[in-house]
């Protein structure tokens, strides 16, 4: 944060207040209102935090108007093309790209942490078979704090590091186990000779009865999905992780809170909701009906996979994801897939419609990721768990940054109270 000589003047009645303004390295200036309540006795009002910077951070930068997403300064399209997920994890966590030795060490440490405590298998069996894998993940990731006591002390830097590694390494195993459990197949142990993405596909799709070969194009597409979802600044689930952690809660409980928040259809649940919507549309001739519903003020229906709180011209992740979708569908030879045809035609018609253009609603990353995951053979219920696997590194990096920040305070927003003022209790017989 750079201190500048700039300040804002706020006038309330006949009093004026000078509020400092700070300039970031990129993005809009921020007005520091921290002392406002103490001096002027007012709160600011910003439901949904549309104009509020909740923290300072050096991890990820987004310019929503220009469609820019940078991790530690590196553009997402360069990372998606030239890097790979575990290198991006190192970058997010440590601030710089690793040299070859540091990367090898990091990959080895992540790989060596991929197995979960054997007793966790019993824990899974307590869930109903038909439980949504996200429900299972919220429970099992939260339960990690009951298994890994030696990495729950947030004041110990080494324990924080171990917890971070454990989460990045074990959340894919837990997601794959949730999937296997839901389809009644045996859990598949991780394999240390496979890269992160291939290992995840192996844990999801292999069965003990036969050998499973991971196709390198599918593994690359999986790695890209992980990379493109790795972090996204102070989004709803990341802010949830930060808020949960601000009370001093342990990292496993905080990441479980992030997973719970991610589940919602306006956030990570959009990829599942998007594919279900495409299936419901069914055939291209029904698209105008659904576009009409999305535009109707009296209908709560929205086109899932369209729009973003921050990106108002295009989602840079969607551009890369679209290329990946083409590659995967080409590889699998499923050009004639009806869902894909609906998706392509819906994208075309929505982009030509003035409603979507005027409101700056474009396909987001989840519009295309669902198409790839469906083509790979994942059921829709696994789409959001895969998002959770990818985003774990973002949550963990933001959590580590926050704990190390000496300014870290418990998060405690205030409110605009519109309820009853004080009144006396009325005995039940008099109500
Ligand atoms: N379909 C139809 N209309 C929409 C849509 C949509 N998908 N998204 C926004 N609008 C309209 C909305 O009705 C509103 O219209 P009006 O100004 O007339 O009231 C206007 O656009 C602005 O919408 P908003 O809800 O105020 O915008 P927001 O920034 O609060 O919401 C959003 C962003 C992502 C929640 C929203 O666009 C949405 O619900 N999209 C569908 C769900 C989705 O795809 N989510 C995934 C986001 S990307 C993955 C992630 O990062 O989590």
Image: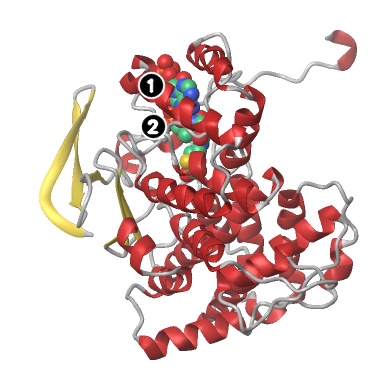
Q: Nearer the viewer, residue 231 or 157?
A: 231
Q: Is residue 26 above or below residue 360?
A: below
Q: Within 10 Å of the Cα at label 1, are there few (<14), some (14-19), or many (20+) other Cα atoms?
A: some
What's the distance in space between the residues labelled 2 and 1, CA to CA? 7 Å
Please, which residue is most extreme toward the left here? Answer: 5
The numbered disc on residue 362 is 2
Q: Percent x, y for residue 76?
A: 34, 57
Please, which residue is most extreme toward the bottom here? Answer: 101
Instruction: Please give left or right for residue 176 compared with residue 300 in the image.
Output: right
Instruction: Please give left or right for residue 401 compared with residue 136 in the image.
Output: left
Helix, strand or loop under label 2: loop
Marks 2 and 1 in Cβ contact (< 8 Å): yes
Q: Nearer the viewer, residue 36 or 331?
A: 331
First of labels 2, 1 by sequence position: 1
Q: Nearer the viewer, residue 143 or 40?
A: 143
Taking the image as drawn, is residue 47 in sight? no
Quarter the N terminus occupies: bottom left
The image quarter in which residue 8 lies: top left
Quarter the C terminus occupies: top right
Q: Is mark 1 within 8 Å of ligand 1?
A: yes
Q: Percent x, y for residue 366?
A: 51, 42
Residue placed at 64% from the left, 83% from the top? 192
Q: Nearer the viewer, residue 149 or 215?
A: 215
Label 1 sits on residue: 356
Q: Percent x, y for residue 289?
A: 56, 12
Instruction: Please give left or right for residue 12 compared with residue 38 in the image.
Output: left
Residue placed at 44% from the left, 56% from the top? 228
The image quarter in which residue 277 lies: top right
């Amino acid at each position: 944060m750079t201190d500048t000589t700039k300040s804002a003047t706020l006038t309330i009645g006949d009093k004026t207040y000078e509020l400092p303004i700070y300039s970031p390295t990129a993005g809009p200036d921020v007005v520091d209102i921290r002392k406002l309540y103490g001096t002027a006795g007012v709160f600011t009002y910003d439901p949904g935090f549309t104009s509020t910077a909740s923290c300072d951070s050096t991890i990820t930068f987004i310019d929503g108007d220009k469609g820019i997403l940078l991790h530690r300064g590196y553009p997402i399209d360069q990372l998606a093309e030239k890097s790979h997920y575990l290198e991006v994890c190192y970058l997010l966590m440590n601030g710089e790209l690793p040299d070859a030795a540091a990367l090898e060490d990091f990959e080895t440490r992540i790989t060596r942490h991929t197995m979960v405590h054997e007793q966790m298998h019993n824990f899974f069996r307590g869930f109903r078979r038909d439980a949504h894998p996200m429900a299972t993940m919220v429970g099992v990731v939260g339960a990690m704090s009951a298994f890994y006591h030696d990495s729950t002390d947030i004041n110990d830097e080494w324990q924080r590091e171990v917890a971070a590694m454990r989460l990045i390494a074990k959340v894919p195993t837990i997601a794959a186990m949730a999937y296997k459990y839901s389809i009644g197949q045996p859990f598949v142990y991780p394999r240390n000779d496979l890269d992160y993405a291939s290992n995840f596909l192996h844990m999801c799709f292999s069965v003990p009865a036969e050998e499973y070969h991971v196709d390198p194009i599918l593994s690359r597409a999986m790695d890209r999905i992980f990379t493109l979802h790795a972090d996204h600044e102070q989004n709803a689930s990341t802010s949830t992780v930060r808020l949960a952690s601000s009370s001093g809660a342990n990292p496993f409980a905080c990441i479980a809170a992030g997973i719970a928040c991610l589940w919602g259809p306006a956030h990570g649940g959009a990829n599942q909701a998007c594919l279900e919507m495409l299936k419901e549309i069914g055939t291209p001739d029904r698209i105008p009906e659904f576009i009409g519903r999305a535009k109707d003020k009296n209908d709560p229906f929205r086109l899932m996979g369209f729009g973003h709180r921050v990106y108002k011209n295009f989602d840079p992740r969607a551009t890369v994801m679209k290329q990946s979708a083409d590659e995967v569908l080409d590889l699998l030879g499923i050009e004639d897939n009806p869902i894909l045809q609906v998706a392509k035609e819906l994208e075309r018609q929505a982009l030509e419609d003035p409603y979507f253009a005027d409101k700056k609603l474009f396909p987001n990353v989840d519009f295309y990721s669902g198409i790839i995951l469906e083509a790979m053979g994942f059921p829709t219920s696994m789409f959001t768990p895969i998002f959770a696997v990818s985003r774990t590194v973002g949550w963990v990096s933001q959590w580590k940054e926050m704990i190390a920040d000496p300014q870290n305070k418990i998060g405690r927003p205030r409110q605009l109270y519109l309820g009853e003022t004080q009144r006396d209790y009325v005995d039940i017989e008099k109500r």
